Image: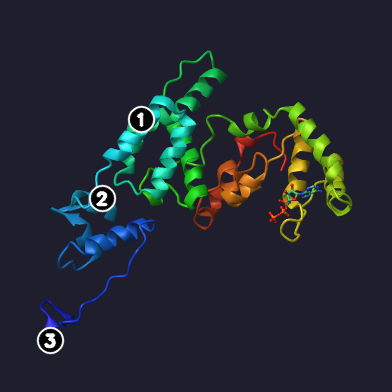
Amino acid sequence: MPEEGHPEIMKTNAIGRVYTVHPNNAECFYLRMLLHEIRGPTNFTDLRTIDGYICHTYREACQRLGLLENDNHWELTLQEATLTASAEQIRELFAIILTTCNPSNPKQLWDSFKRNMSDDILYQIRQANPELTIEFNDDIFNETLIRLEDKCLAINNQTLVEIGMPAPQRNTFSVLNYEITKEKSYNVNELLEYIAHNKPLLNDNQKKKIYNVIMNRINNNTGGIIYLDAPGGTGKTFLINLILAEIRAEKHIALALASSGIAATLMEGGRTAHSALQLPLNIAEQQSRYVKSQEHLDGVNF
Ligand SMILES: Nc1ncnc2c1ncn2[C@@H]1O[C@H](COP(=O)(O)OP(=O)(O)OP(=O)(O)O)[C@@H](O)[C@H]1O
């Protein structure tokens, strides 16, 4: 017999089973939670409608229904961290909380602690512009969000939006010209020591087939794309780090970019391409903005 008002749905005694969803698949997870709480929804908007208010996300609906535990302990954890930890450490801690602990209201935690997570950035900008009076502003918080998102991507491959946080604007001019500053701050003496120790270790294959070829192209400014492939453990990273050191010891800029956070950590000064080039996360949707001027990287050779 059909369900009243829904002729296409038959009444049945069968007990259905809702698929299990991992909390990392956040919106799906909250949707599943709502399906167990809200009786007789006829569409997805019904599930998000709480006391006549249509919530923007399923997470928000769960929150309004009081289904999520409160974030007091995360608030206390971050509060405690602010007493002793640096801004960078607090960002690291917050990224771990966001990616692995599923706080129920990340935006509120962000609003409470964004200043603590940004004061190193404010300090650096003040140092670079001593003649200006600079206070916390949206650009600084945006820079903090970018760094936070880079960490979340490296830890769990999640963007901030997926975690219920505000999305950083990645296509704006960096407040810090961070790449250039970072690339110019290598200690040349340490690099020379590194080279002196490691260069003699190169074996024949590494030296003749790869190192010499690449260094010749760099020194002759001929450039090009070189694809290096070899079995695991045969010294690719070793070689790349040596070449990076050689270029940086000459006070030139070498960007070590990788497509994932894990790969980036293997290279000295490595970063994800998304972070360094401020690529949009969904390239397919934003192709027109994909190739754009990179003012913040003026002076960098790729
Ligand atoms: N010529 C060399 N002399 C001494 N040690 C070397 C040399 N080449 C590589 N190694 C060492 O061998 C180990 C493996 O090298 P490396 O990590 O560079 O390999 P890889 O090809 O990048 O590996 P994977 O593909 O697994 O990342 C490292 O500990 C590295 O320091």
- Of callouts 2 and 3, which one flags the residue occurring earlier in the amino acid sequence? 3
Q: Tell me residue 104's x, y (percent).
A: 29, 47
**Quadrant hosting residue 10:** bottom left
Residue 229 located left or right of residue 31: right
Q: Amino acid at mark 1?
A: Glu
- Of callouts 1 and 2, which one flags the residue occurring earlier in the amino acid sequence? 2
The residue beneath circle 3 is: 1
Q: Tell me residue 37's x, y (percent).
A: 18, 61
**Residue lying at 35% horizontally and 49% vertically, measured from the top left:** 102
Q: Tell me residue 121's x, y (percent).
A: 49, 27
Tag of residue 80: 1
**Residue lying at 40% horizontally and 49% vertically, measured from the top left:** 100
Disc 3/disc 1 C-alpha distance (Å): 60 Å
Q: How many marks?
A: 3
Q: Using the image, determine if residue 122 lies above or below residue 293.
A: above
Within-10-Å neighbours for mark 3: few <14, some 14–19, many 20+ = few
**Residue lying at 28% horizontally and 63% vertically, measured from the top left:** 32
Q: Amino acid at mark 2?
A: Glu
Disc 2/disc 3 C-alpha distance (Å): 36 Å
Quadrant the N terminus occupies: bottom left
In this rendering, which labeled residue sits more in front, label 3 or label 1?
1
In this rendering, which labeled residue sits more in front, label 1 or label 2?
1
Look at the numbered disc 1 and say if its residue's Cβ is closer than 8 Å to ligand 1.
no
Quadrant the C terminus occupies: top right
Helix, strand or loop at mark 2: helix
**Residue lying at 19% horizontally and 68% vertically, measured from the top left:** 42
- Of callouts 3 and 1, which one flags the residue occurring earlier in the amino acid sequence? 3
Q: In this rendered view, identify the residue nearer to me: 176 or 153.
A: 153
The residue beneath circle 2 is: 60
Helix, strand or loop at mark 1: helix
